Amino acid sequence: FANIAHGCNSVLATTTALKLADYVVTEAGFGADLGGEKFIDIKCRKTGLMPDAVVLVATIRALKMHGGVKKEDLKVENLKALEAGMSNLQRHVENVKKFGVPIAVAINHFIADTEAEVQVIKDFCKEHGVEAFKCTHWAEGGKGATELAHAVVALCEQKNNFKFVYQDSDSLWDKVTKIATSIYGAGAVTADAKVRAQIDKLQSSGYGHYPVCIAKTQYSFSTDASKRGDRKS
């Protein structure tokens, strides 16, 4: 799982699929801040693979929860809470844009979602230069995601300015700092003497060129799972 590990399938699986199909879709798991970052900074870096497009999956339920709605009330239309929770989606969109890859938002539709709620997400994404698509594949199979599929094909034809969050030559501490400040929104990174000593030992022992894999809750941009929306602390 991407909250503790790299959160993506094997290199063998991806490279095999690329030999068998024109388009390969692979899951990066648990958010653009966790799975997405690790997919790009670890898997893509080590394999030389470069994604042509990113599909950011969002649910109205999750966004309403980020807007302050309790789990037992998520089936009730709440446009105000949804609008409040859109700050979380905005942060994920901004993070994906930092990778320089074209993006589309897939609204994973649930039975209780209303058309008014779907429209809130579509309008919001349009304002931020991204197109969102209502996806009903759970109920309709492939037919329910056809519009999204056509959009992804079009995105794959766009110019790609793919880039990593950090470089191999950066120190381990600098890599951690760049992820925390660029992706998680931290103002700075601190560590006690024991942790810094461990990192310095790894660096001096010749491991500094490796990528880093950060373990963190998938429920928040911060280390506190109870912090909703786009809150960083």
Image (cartoon, rainbow, N blue to C red):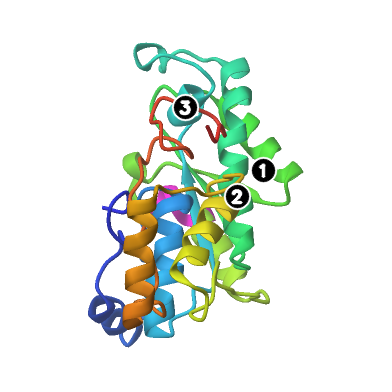
Does the magenta run of residues contain 184?
no
Residue 93 got which mark?
A: 2
Q: In this view, does 131 lie above or below 81?
A: below
Q: In this view, does 150 lie above or below 139?
A: below
The residue at 40%/66% (across/down) is 39
Residue 202 sits in quarter: bottom left
Label 1 is placed on what type of residue? Cys
Circles 2 and 3: CB atoms closer than 8 Å: no
Q: Mark 1 points at which residue?
A: 125
Circles 1 and 2: CB atoms closer than 8 Å: yes
The residues bearing labels 1 and 2 have C-alpha atoms spaced at a distance of: 9 Å
In the rendered structure, the answer to whether residue 2 lies left or right of residue 166 reads left
| Mark whose residue sits in front, 2 or 3 | 3
Number of residues whose C-alpha sits closer than 10 Å to that of mark 3, classed few (under 14), some (14–19) or many (20 or more): some
Label 3 is placed on what type of residue? Lys
| Mark whose residue sits in front, 3 or 1 | 3
| Mark whose residue sits in front, 1 or 2 | 2
Of pointers 2 and 3, the one earlier in the residue sequence: 2
Does the magenta run of residues contain 143?
yes
Residue 42 got which mark?
A: none
Q: Foreground: 233 or 30?
A: 233
> What kind of element bears circle 1?
helix
The kind of secondary structure the magenta stretch mainly shows is helix
Q: Residue at the far bottom: name it.
A: 19
